[in-house]
Image (cartoon, rainbow, N blue to C red):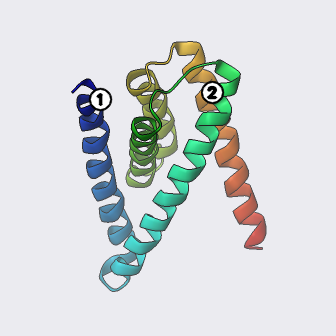
C-alpha cells in the first residue's frame, strides 16, 4: 500500500502538468493550430521524460542516490519534468527561472534528495537541456 500512495502525488502532478502544457500549446497556436500544437506538446513531453530518465540515472552514478523501484521512479521523473515544462511554457519572461526552482524543489520533495544532490541533478539537467536546445538551433540553421 505504501507504494500505491507514492504514486498518487506524481500521477496527480502529471495530469495537471499535461493539461497545462496542452492549454498553453493551444493558446499559443490559436484555434486553427491547436490540435497540431497539442500533438507537438505531447511528443515533446515524451522526449522530455526519456531525456530526464536518462539524465537521472546518469546523475545517480555521480550522487550515489537510489531512486527506488523503476516504475515509481519513472512516474516521479515524468511528474518533475512535466511540471517544470508546464511552468516554463506557461509563464512568460521568467518561466525558465521558475521552472528551475520548481525542478529543484520537486527533486527534494519527490525523490527525497538532499540539497547537494538536488543541486547537482539540477545543474546536469540544465547543461543537457542547454545542449539539446543548442543542437536544435544549429540544426534549424
Most extreme residue toward the bottom is 32
Q: Which residue is mark 2?
A: 60
- Residue 31 appears in which quarter of the rendering? bottom left
Which one is in front in this view, the residue at disc 1 or the one at disc 2? 1
| Residue 69: percent from left, percent from top | 44, 32
Q: Residues within 10 Å of mark 1 (few under 14, many from 20)?
A: few
Which image quadrant is residue 79 in? top left
x%, y% of residue 82? 41, 48
**In whole angstroms, how far apart are the C-alphas of marks 1 and 2?**
21 Å
Callout 2 crowding tier (Cα within 10 Å): few <14, some 14–19, many ≥20: some
Left or right: 6 as drawn, with respect to 114:
left
First in sequence: mark 1 vs mark 2: 1
Residue located beneath label 1 in the image: 3
Q: How many marks?
A: 2
Residue drawn at point x = 64 percent, y = 24 percent: 120
* Quadrant of the rendering where the N terminus is positioned: top left
Find residue 127 and report its horizontal and vertical position in percent: 70, 40
What residue is drawn where x is 34% and y is 86%?
32
Above or below 68: residue 96: below
Which of the two residues, 98 or 5, is positioned nearer the viewer here?
A: 5
Amino acid at each position: 500500500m505504501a507504494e500505491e500512495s507514492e504514486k498518487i502525488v506524481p500521477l496527480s502532478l502529471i495530469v495537471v502538468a499535461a493539461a497545462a502544457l496542452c492549454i498553453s500549446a493551444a493558446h499559443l497556436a490559436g484555434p486553427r493550430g491547436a490540435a497540431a500544437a497539442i500533438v507537438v506538446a505531447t511528443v515533446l513531453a515524451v522526449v522530455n521524460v526519456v531525456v530526464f530518465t536518462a539524465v537521472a540515472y546518469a546523475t545517480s552514478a555521480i550522487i550515489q542516490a537510489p531512486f527506488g523501484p523503476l516504475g515509481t521512479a519513472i512516474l516521479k521523473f515524468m511528474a518533475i519534468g512535466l511540471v517544470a515544462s508546464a511552468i516554463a511554457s506557461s509563464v512568460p519572461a521568467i518561466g525558465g527561472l521558475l521552472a528551475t526552482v520548481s525542478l529543484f524543489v520537486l527533486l527534494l520533495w519527490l525523490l527525497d534528495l538532499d540539497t547537494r544532490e538536488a543541486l547537482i541533478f539540477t545543474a546536469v539537467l540544465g547543461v543537457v537541456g542547454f545542449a539539446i536546445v543548442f543542437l536544435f538551433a544549429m540544426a534549424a540553421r
